[in-house]
Amino acid sequence: MKTRLLASALASGGRDRGCQRAPQALRPWQPRWIAHEREAQPRPWPEQSAVALSAGASLYRRAALLRRAGVRPLLVGGDHSQAIGYWSGIAAVRGPGMGMIWIDAHLDSHTPASSDSHKLHGMPLATLLGQADERWLSLLGRLPTLDAAHTCVIGYRSYECAEYQLLASLGVHLISAERLHRQSWPCAWQEALQRARGARYGYGVSLDLDVFSPRCAPGVSVPVEGGLDLDAFLPSWRQLRWDTRCKGLEIAEYNPALDRRGQTRQLLRRLIAVHLPLRRR
Ligand SMILES: [Mn+2]
């Protein structure tokens, strides 16, 4: 399947604005399109949600356009709130009820009612499962983008009780970082893949860079100790390249302002190179 790179400069969904500069790291791959926010200044909730909504709507349109052309987009960049518009756009082509493998140190499943900070990058998974702010639901349509029975979260190790309870009550399959210490990565990955692939209209993979250890990926907005090793993960990421049931890819939360010695940038390059080899000139 043909893969196309999209970049995202979305940053207002988090506390730190550093993700705005994420698209600069993607220059060698010449992204086809960059998602921007119309306002650089963070605003208090609920106005912030309105700013994010307009960027979300343009991501939705772009993702849907590419999917209609039979292309698999790879969205790289900004804070994880970008997932809302992006995945709902991908699902719009065939209808809601996609499968999802959400690889993240966090559960990203707050709702406006449960979140103290009201930061949208803490809410994308709940939103895509239909548990969201009213305004977002109107963009996403009547039915949840994701089918909870075919959704898995892998690698989480920092979360709040309300998020866990929400996902457990919806029947989302949860594989914690703690479980990954006991079980090998390939086993956990196969388990998640099997579940996601069973969804009617295919599945997506959303990779938050904070799932990796901050020792190899310090350039993320909310680092958490522990985490995945890139070398263990890469074979699984490569496997996706030829799977036609995989309809889209996403890498989120790259924050160049917090990177150290270009480590995270280097990791990002290795991940992108799997799906978009650079042509030699
Ligand atoms: Mn995340």
Image (cartoon, rainbow, N blue to C red):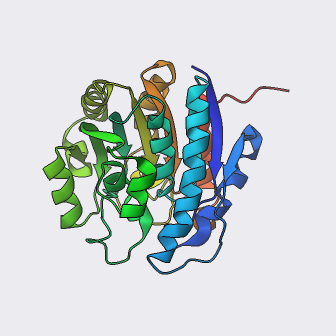
- Left/right of residue 52 with respect to residue 172 in the rendered view: right
Where is residue 97, by image quadrant?
top left
What residue is at 36 percent from the left and 36 percent from the top?
A: 96
Tell me the quadrant of the picture where the C terminus can be found: top right
What residue is at 21 percent from the left and 45 percent from the top?
A: 174
Q: Tell me where residue 177 appears, x and y as whole percent.
A: 27, 50
Q: Tell me where residue 54 appears, x and y as whole percent.
A: 58, 60
Q: Tell me where residue 55 appears, x and y as whole percent.
A: 59, 58
Residue 133's place in the image compared with 183, above or below, is: below
- Left/right of residue 192 with respect to residue 254 in the rendered view: left
Residue 31's place in the image compared with 25, above or below, is: above
Tell me the quadrant of the picture where the N terminus can be found: top right
What residue is at 36 percent from the left and 62 percent from the top?
A: 134
Total marks shown come to 0
Which sits in the foreground, 52 or 215?
52
What residue is at 25 percent from the left and 29 percent from the top?
A: 195
Residue 219 visible in image: no
Where is residue 160, by image quadrant?
bottom left
